[in-house]
Amino acid sequence: MTASMTGKTVLVTGASGFTGRHMIDALKARGYRVVGLGVAPSQADVMLPCDLTDAASVRQAVAQAQPDYVIHLAALSFVGHGDAEAFYRVNVFGTLNLLEALAALPVKPRKVLIASSANVYGTPDVEVIDESICPAPVNHYACSKLAMEHMARTWFDRLPTIITRPFNYTGPGQDERFLIPKIVGHFQRGAREIELGNLDVSRDFSDVSDVVNAYVALVESDAASVIVNVCSGRATSLREVIAMMNTMAGYDIEVRVNPAFVRQNEIPRMLGDNAALRKLVGALPQTPIETTLTRMFLANH
């Protein structure tokens, strides 16, 4: 970071969430002042309680923050969430409220990074997914993220914006509603069996620290008006994850396949192409999945 960036203010939405907590640590380590938006305490230098679906609340918080940079992480992200309408209220209209408030500032931020999701691609019949693949979402979470992208693109001429499409990522502190933390949690507790869905699905897993480092690099770059994948470029199956954890924990867990956990419209394999990211910010360190699993297994263990 250049000396001119030290002490600059970054507004982070979703500051008390899984990604937000890691993001705040990364930003503070680089000398930024962090203002967090969220509904729970966080490690931000200043925390502003704010409901993104309340436009007046967002305007007030943004005016108070006066950010130099914005990293918009807040979203309803659990695919299995039961309230379909909530995905659109939070992910689309919450983002709209934020962009309107930012555009109304007397001094606009230097960069706005908006986290979308690789889920927008759906189930493309290709081996590797790059940004040229036409999105075809298969659930409300992904549909809301794609709608948000289309809406946010209409602001490209008013705010210097980057939209990221992160593939799966995990790390210490992620909720056990998500698959990898669920698996690691079972091993931490010494459970002898676990119920899972399809073990042969493969995902492009990144460590959360790599994702937040990519976000910071993008914010500090000259890039704007782009949509970019954030991924490792490697696919790992759940069967391989189980095998790694068996070795790490020193015993073999019994896996029971529960048909209820096999999602309709299950995406069998998602492997991302990160060439566009590398072109924008250069090569970034990548944490091996084994290292991520070890960090998670040893956390609070």
Image (cartoon, grey):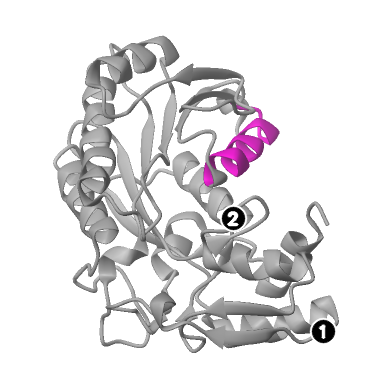
Q: Are marks 2 and 1 in contact (CB under 8 Å)?
A: no
Label 2 secondary element: helix
Query: Along the polypeptide, which appears first: circle 2 or circle 1?
Result: 2
Q: Residue at x 16, y 50 (%)?
A: 150
Up-down relation of residue 74 to residue 4 (above or below):
below
Q: Is residue 234 left or right of residue 101?
A: right
The front one of 182 and 229 is 182
> Which residue in the protein does label 2 denote?
208
- Say whether residue 30 is magenta: yes
Tell me the CA gap for discs 2 and 1.
Answer: 27 Å
If the image is split into quadrants, where does the N terminus sit?
top right
* Amino acid tagged 1: Tyr
Please give the label number shown on residue 232.
none
* Amino acid tagged 2: Val
Up-down relation of residue 188 to residue 159 (above or below):
below
Residue 92 seen by the camera: yes
Label 1 secondary element: loop
Q: Which residues are magenta?
A: 19-32
- Say whether residue 136 is magenta: no
If the image is split into quadrants, where does the C terminus sit?
bottom right
Q: Is residue 64 left or right of residue 33?
A: left
**Percent coordinates x, y for residue 128 in the rendering:** 37, 82
**Percent coordinates x, y for residue 80 in the rendering:** 36, 60
Q: Residue at x 80, y 51 (%)?
A: 300
Q: What secondary structure is the stretch in magenta mostly built from?
A: helix
**Percent coordinates x, y for residue 112 in the rendering:** 36, 36
Please give the label number shown on residue 251.
1
Q: How many numbered callouts?
A: 2
Of badges 2 and 1, nearer the viewer stands 1
